[in-house]
Image (cartoon, rainbow, N blue to C red):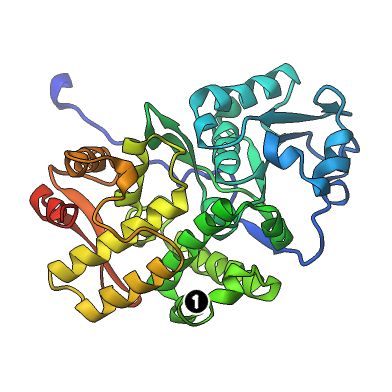
Amino acid sequence: MANDENTQFTISFPGINPGTPNTTILFYKNTPDLVSLYNPGNNNGPRRCFVTDATVATLPCMEEFINMFTDGVCGEDILVILGSGEAFKNIDNVLQIVSNAVDAGFNRKDLFVGIGGGVITDMTGFAASIFKRGAKCEFVPTTLLAMVDASIGGKTGCDFENYKNMIGSFWPAQTIHIFPEFIQTLSKEQYRSGLGEAIKTGLLYNKSLYEIFKNNPQKLNDRDSDTIYSVIKECATAKAKVVEQDLTEKDIRMFLNLGHTFGHALETITGLGVIPHGDAVAWGIGRALTLSAKMEYCKDSYKEEVLSVLDSFGWCTECVPSIAGGAGSADRIIQAMHKDKKNSSDKIRLILQKGMNETFFEEVSDDLIRSILVK
């Protein structure tokens, strides 16, 4: 028999169910009607903890739903209304959601429902994942960014110490209800932010989607209902195919971060919420393609065409946006990029392209990155 100090054994675990075995995405062409969808106060199943923000709560289409709750309670359902925007995407608000569920006597069989943009769906999903070691969640995304990207695929979390999404979990929603008509309520800034994630999807997976940005920008700028519906479905379908194969981002899901390592760093150094996420991603896409061309992975003509399309929508394509400050901004961006979750060495892992829908990742030195952040 082996000496005790040399004895070892291994415990093998089965795959852990990440909240739900699958996600159903439902698309609606009618006006958002959450009263009919959820029938608050009439529970034939789990109790619901509805989470939204102050902006969504004041939308005309939400009025009847919100008014059904007295002091945040309707029957056995509860409603939590948080502040709006990236500044509120923190662990205190995640714990506020959990605290409300605890006070209401919820158990792990009850349901968390996030109604809002990516900030709300991320925090609601995270709260569900840590509540009594895991409750189910559903989302009703209300922004274009949440519909095409943030609500799909199970990434949840919050910001921490001015760094994007430093705390979180993989916890997919069991159902996502998409009402494209919410898009008509968005500010110009919010809408364009969502377009930043949509054009990213086109560059990664769908040339026809990219061609809409290139050849039919007016339909997008006019928020043409049929065009928006098509863009949302194409983006949701593309992301669903990726996360089915790589939920926890070990391989191909990393491609979805095209532009994000640059973009998140820009958001960090300017202050989270100052630059809309999609705008930062669009700038980051321009930097990633500029670096791809400099390293001779893609043709200059491809880079220049995409930069021209980005510029036509008003996204910054400069080395560093003026809002990032003057001298030293490149080094501050690089320092923030080193905090990215995907890094595994002293170099920075970036998503680069050889051309349309030809994507790969590579670890890149600080000096190379600095070369495309300075004039």
Residue that extends furthest to the left in the rendered view of this protein: 367
- Relative to the observer, which residue lies in front, 4 or 93? 93
Amino acid type for the residue under numbered disc 1: Leu
| Residue 291 in the figure: left or right of residue 274 | left
| Residue 100 in the figure: left or right of residue 196 | right
Label 1 environment density (alpha carbons within 10 Å; few <14, some 14–19, many ≥20): some
x, y (%) of residue 218? 57, 75
For residue 308, what is the image quadrant?
A: bottom left
Residue 22 seen in the current view: no
Residue that numbered label 1 is attached to: 209
For residue 318, what is the image quadrant?
A: bottom left
Q: Residue at x 88, y 42 (%)?
A: 64
Q: Residue at x 58, y 31 (%)?
A: 127
For residue 332, what is the image quadrant?
A: top left
| Residue 310 in the figure: left or right of residue 112 | left
* For residue 173, above or below residue 129: below
* For residue 86, above or below residue 187: above
Quarter of the C terminus within the rendering: bottom left
Residue 325 seen in the current view: yes
x, y (%) of residue 282? 39, 59
* For residue 4, above or below residue 199: above
* For residue 256, above or below residue 58: below
| Residue 61 in the figure: left or right of residue 215 | right
Quarter of the N terminus within the rendering: top left
Q: Residue at x 43, y 80 (%)?
A: 207
Residue that extends furthest to the top in the rendered view of this protein: 103
x, y (%) of residue 253? 38, 59
x, y (%) of residue 326? 22, 41
Disc 1 element: helix
Count of picture labels: 1
